[in-house]
Image (cartoon, grey):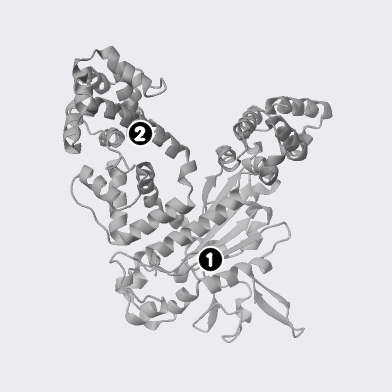
Amino acid sequence: MNKIQAYFDYFDKYLGVENWGWYKSLTYWINIASEIKNIVISDTEIKGKSNEEINKIISDKSDNKLKTVGDFFDRFLFYQDNGLGNIGQGVIWDSEDNPHKTAIKEKINKDYFIELLQCKDISQADTKIDIIIEGKNYEAAKIRLLRALFPADFAAVDAPNKLWRLLNALKDKLNISTNGNNVQRHQELMHLVDCADLNKKQIFFWELFYMLENNLNLKKAIVYYGAPGTGKTFKAKNIAKQFIDQHRIKIESKTKNNYQVKTVQFHPSYSYEDFIEGIRPSSDKSLKLFNGTFKEFCKTAGEKEINLYKDIDFINNDSFKERDYRFSLIKVSELNDNQKQILGIDSIMPEGITVEEVIEPAFFIIDEINRAELSRVFGELMFSLEYRGYNGKIKTQYSYLNNESDDSVYFWDNSEDWFFIPQNVYIIGTMNNIDRSVDSFDFALRRRFMWEEIQPDFNTVRNILSANWKNDLAIAFERLNNRIESEELLGKDYRIGHSYALEITPIQNRFDSVTEVKKFLWSDYVMPLLEEYLRGLGDENKAQEKLNQFKIEFGI
């Protein structure tokens, strides 16, 4: 329970959930449901009121977003995305010719509506909802409605399969299990965290799954790509620190700060010798073999793994060998005392904890990854990107020059120096779609990375800026981007990222109106970028015409 609270405290302190659109929407709609429920529960005579009066209560309490009993249930039971959450299987409710929806709506009369809202016991409400859906397995839609009515007792993990995945992750990673039916499991989860903000607690358990089961573990290499100014490098650094922090919570590490995160920026002259290894002059004026930036980073970050492979009992263990020494498949409980000592394990771990989960992650961030000649920079690394650790060891171009005592030696085995990418090393690359060197990623190399497009997000502008014109500025950029995206000669890759709007953050108090801000940003940031985009038209008059159209769309 203390570990769950530690995860929540981190989530609450660093992830800024108060600025999330989901949190704001969730808070709005749950408040509406709560107010309606409180009115119905407190009025013992409400059953005698006319249907029109009940509809008026709903309408008055929802800023005219809901007008009737039918509107209430349409949103809280039938919508795929209803403000509380988005459920894939809920899409069936949107079809007007769906016989299940028709049959259910026929049963939702005034009396049923009042009886459901007056339920003070969750199991009673659960049974009442089961009756109207005739046993159909729409558990996610049902849980979402119950969550609106009983926000203190349900996490925002509506789908049963997602709930089971979370419960299994809690059991395997943190040695925490919950029992009972789905409703009881939700209640147990919510009681694990101490926080008065029920909506924040609901969202936390959705995010907790990704804290425990992060997709970065699939390939341990990802490229963030998108339009310029979308904060790709900023996101990469934040993700790296968050990933490491969450790992420390999981194993109860006392380490603070001191993250193993290295950032390099590729450019056209960046080479294999810079990245892996090369012969360079030394301080004694002789030529020596030096490790490149990435190889030296791997040597430092992979120290525990390298030492583990030097342990005879580990490397000769047939069971470990059959699993290709993959740390994600080897449990800490399978290690002997010496091997645990190598990894720095001095406490009892949950039964399901793997070796991968106790070695602290390290992140190597490659900014502008596509600006270098990648086939030359990565060299024979293609194999090691695919197969991590001992099973992916390779001979590098200059490894034959090494002796066992040389400083540049990486892993000495059978009288030879080998290289591999440690299993705790994660690689994050960033790239702009419009860079002319985008084709440097061949298909073989692309397959070794996950890919995530980072979109312009002007809600960031609304959240970060404090000036009263921030929403108008965000709308102006969104309109401009819509115009750019629809332009045949440009398209979505040429949109303007939100980082351009955030340039005025330190000086926002200088501006009295959004018009002044837009003029400043247009002349110093936006117009020069668009001029560069349009330079390739070969027609100065046409380029100027397009630029004027963009300027009008921007609102100046």
Q: CA distance from mark 1 to mark 2?
A: 39 Å
The kind of residue on which mark 2 rests is Ile
Residue 175, percent from left and from top: 28, 61
**Which quarter of the figure has residue 55?**
top left
Residue 133, compared with residue 320, is above or below; it is above
In-image side of 505 versus 306 (left or right): right
Screen quadrant of the N terminus: bottom left
Q: Secondary structure at mark 2?
A: helix
Numbered tag placed on residue 287 in the rendering: none
Q: Residue furthest right?
A: 540
The residue carrying mark 1 is: 259
Question: In this view of the protein, can residue 148 be seen by the observer?
Answer: yes
Which residue is at 59% across, 32% downward?
A: 471
Which residue is at 39% across, 53% downward?
A: 8
**Which quarter of the figure has residue 549?**
top right
**Of residues 47 and 475, which is closer to you in this image?**
47
Which residue is at 76% across, 34% downward?
A: 534
Mark 1 and mark 2 lie on one chain; the one further toward the N terminus is: 2
Which residue is at 34% across, 43% downward?
A: 198
Residue 396, compared with residue 473, is above or below; it is below
Q: Secondary structure at mark 1?
A: loop
**Which quarter of the figure has residue 463?**
top right
Residue 6, percent from left and from top: 38, 59
The residue carrying mark 2 is: 30
Residue 369, percent from left and from top: 63, 54
**Of residues 175 and 379, which is closer to you in this image?**
175
In-image side of 143 versus 12 (left or right): left
Foreground: disc 1 or disc 2: 2
Screen quadrant of the C terminus: top right
